[in-house]
Image (tube, helix red, strand yellow):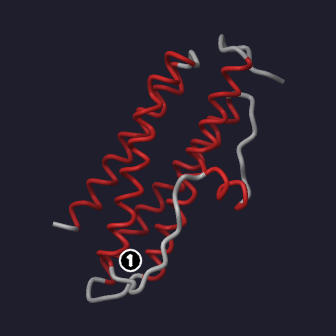
């Protein structure tokens, strides 16, 4: 049953489609952060292992929240590896060595890329698709990623 929330069917579909891409990016970022958690090596192993665990925990909550936002708008969230790989704008990186600086740099680049993508869509959701709720939602999501990126960036100083 389609929600009757003051947003046209076409706009709801447009918002859900855009959120599908965001969910795919969140899933890839989560997976890459899990990889860092599992495979980081070096003298700072223990602290970085715990740090990456903290970050993937946040990303797990974000993924659930994005998927639930899609569902609240009357659409289904993508939930297969194939669909995530088709929808994401991230790529996988093979590491020559599993040091914390390499993982942190890669994750930071992805967070910053996602922040830019979210920022670019705030006004599209509000003005073009007439969905102030999702505009507000991704503003908060952007702020969460800004903080996560700050935490990553601080390790590289």
Q: Quadrant of the C terminus?
A: bottom left
Return the residue found at the far right. 1
Judging depth in this view, the residue of 39 and 114 nearest the camera is: 114
Asked whether, in this view, residue 131 is left or right of residue 84, the answer is: left
Most foreground residue, 102 or 50:
102
The answer to which image quadrant residue 37 occupies is bottom left
- Residue 83 x/y as whole percent: 71, 54
Task: Say if 107 sits above or below 44 in the image.
Answer: above
- Look at 49% across and 78% down and name the residue there: 94
Instruction: State the residue position of label 1.
Output: 49
Res 27 quadrant in image: bottom right
User: Residue reaching furthest top?
Assistant: 6
Quadrant containing the N terminus in the rendered view: top right
Task: Residue at 53%, 51% (x, y): give it.
Answer: 61
Marks counted in the figure total 1
Image height of 7 relative to 106, above or below: above
Q: Callout 1: 10 Å neighbours few (<14), some, many (20+)?
A: some
Q: Is mark 1 on a helix, strand or loop?
A: helix
Where's residue 4, x and y in %? 73, 14
Asked if residue 33 is positioned above or below residue 143 in the image, the reply reads below
Residue at 42 percent across and 57 percent down: it is 110
Asked whether, in this view, residue 51 is left or right of residue 157, the answer is right
Q: Which residue is drawn at 38% across and 44% down?
A: 144
Query: Where is residue 126 shown, x and y percent of the image?
Result: 50, 19
Q: Where is residue 48 in the image (x, y as percent from the top left)?
A: 33, 75
């Amino acid at each position: 049953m389609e929600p009757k929330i003051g947003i046209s069917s076409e706009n709801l579909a447009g918002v859900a489609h855009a959120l599908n891409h965001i969910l795919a990016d969140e899933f890839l970022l989560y997976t890459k952060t899990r990889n860092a958690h599992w495979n980081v090596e070096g003298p700072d192993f223990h602290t970085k292992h715990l740090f990456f665990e903290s970050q993937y925990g946040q990303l797990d909550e974000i993924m659930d929240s994005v998927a639930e936002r899609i569902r609240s708008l009357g659409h289904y969230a993508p939930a297969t590896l194939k669909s995530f790989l088709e929808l994401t704008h991230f790529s996988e990186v093979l590491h020559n060595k599993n040091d914390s600086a390499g993982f942190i740099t890669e994750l930071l680049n992805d967070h910053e890329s996602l922040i830019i993508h979210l920022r670019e869509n705030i006004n599209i959701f509000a003005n073009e698709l007439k969905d102030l709720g999702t505009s507000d939602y991704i503003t908060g999501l952007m702020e969460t990623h800004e903080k996560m990126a700050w935490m990553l960036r601080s390790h590289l100083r």
